[in-house]
Image (cartoon, grey):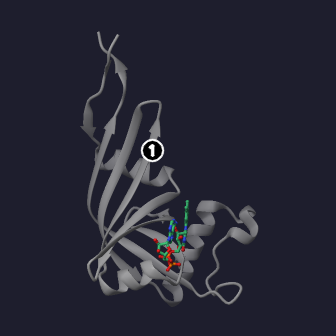
Amino acid sequence: VIPARVIRQLSRAEIDDLLRAHLVGRIGCHAAGVTYVVPVIYAYDGDGFYVASIEGQKIRMMRENPEVCFEVDEYDKGNWRSAIVQGVYEELAGAEADRAIELLAERFGRADGDRTPRRHGQDGVTTVCFRIRVGEVTGRAVTRSAAS
Ligand SMILES: Cc1cc2nc3c(=O)[nH]c(=O)nc-3n(C[C@H](O)[C@H](O)[C@H](O)COP(=O)(O)OP(=O)(O)OC[C@H]3O[C@@H](n4cnc5c(N)ncnc54)[C@H](O)[C@@H]3O)c2cc1C
């Protein structure tokens, strides 16, 4: 029996399910002739991905060019789902940054202890909170099934 693999498009509701189910996504950014893809942990609220980050290359690049891509996927025994989002980087301050930390804490659970992101950094490291505001979204999936 040859498995049939048909790539289908996910509906927006299916994409939202995928984005809410996962914790790790990949940011794709581009600035000054360099393309950079980097994994981060996120909380998704339907309109944006909230991330707590250290200062570094990705933050420098997204400040320079806020047009970014965000990708989430899963793979299991030949079945896969993925979503690709075109978005805009927005750095958060004050109450908005606090809300980002709240969303991340809710998503990961406070039992996570010291690994819960902190607004004001630890060990002298500054935390940068940001949102990737969701623009155009696409989703695709393959469900492997036995061909008749
Ligand atoms: C599953 C997962 C979840 C993560 N979640 C977060 C998160 O929520 N917030 C966060 O700030 N960071 C997270 N990280 C770490 C993140 O991927 C980066 O390593 C880190 O944020 C530093 O990125 P930067 O652009 O500031 O790199 P810099 O410290 O400025 O370093 C840039 C240099 O390091 C290399 N580099 C950076 N990151 C990686 C990497 N992951 N793998 C290989 N090479 C790398 C780059 O290619 C470049 O040469 C996560 C990593 C993983 C694997």
Q: Is residue 51 shown above or below 94? A: above
Q: Position of residue 114 (x, y in %)?
A: 74, 71
Q: Residue furthest front?
A: 33
Which image quarter holds the N terminus? top left
Along the line of sight, the residue nearer the viewer: 63 or 88: 63
Which image quarter holds the C terminus? top left
Q: Position of residue 74 (x, y in %)?
A: 45, 44
Q: Is residue 145 shown above or below 88? A: above
Q: Residue at x 36, y 21 (%)?
A: 145
| Mark 1 residue element | strand
Judged left or right of residue 143, residue 109 is right
The quarter holding residue 69 reads bottom left
Q: Residue at x 31, y 80 (%)?
A: 66
How many labels sit on residues? 1
Judged left or right of residue 145, residue 38 is right
The kind of residue on which mark 1 rests is: Glu
> In the rendered image, which residue does mark 1 sit on?
74
Q: Residue at x 41, y 31 (%)?
A: 78
Along the line of sight, the residue nearer the viewer: 36 or 122: 36
Q: Position of residue 11 (x, y in %)?
A: 28, 45
Q: Position of residue 65 (x, y in %)?
A: 29, 82
The quarter holding residue 140 reads top left
Judged left or right of residue 26, residue 2 is left
Q: Is residue 146 shown above or below 30? A: above
Assess mark 1: CB under 8 A from ligand 1?
no
The quarter holding residue 81 reads top left
Q: Is residue 55 shown above or below 39? A: below
Mark 1 residue crowding within 10 angstroms, few (<14) / some (14–19) / many (20+)? few
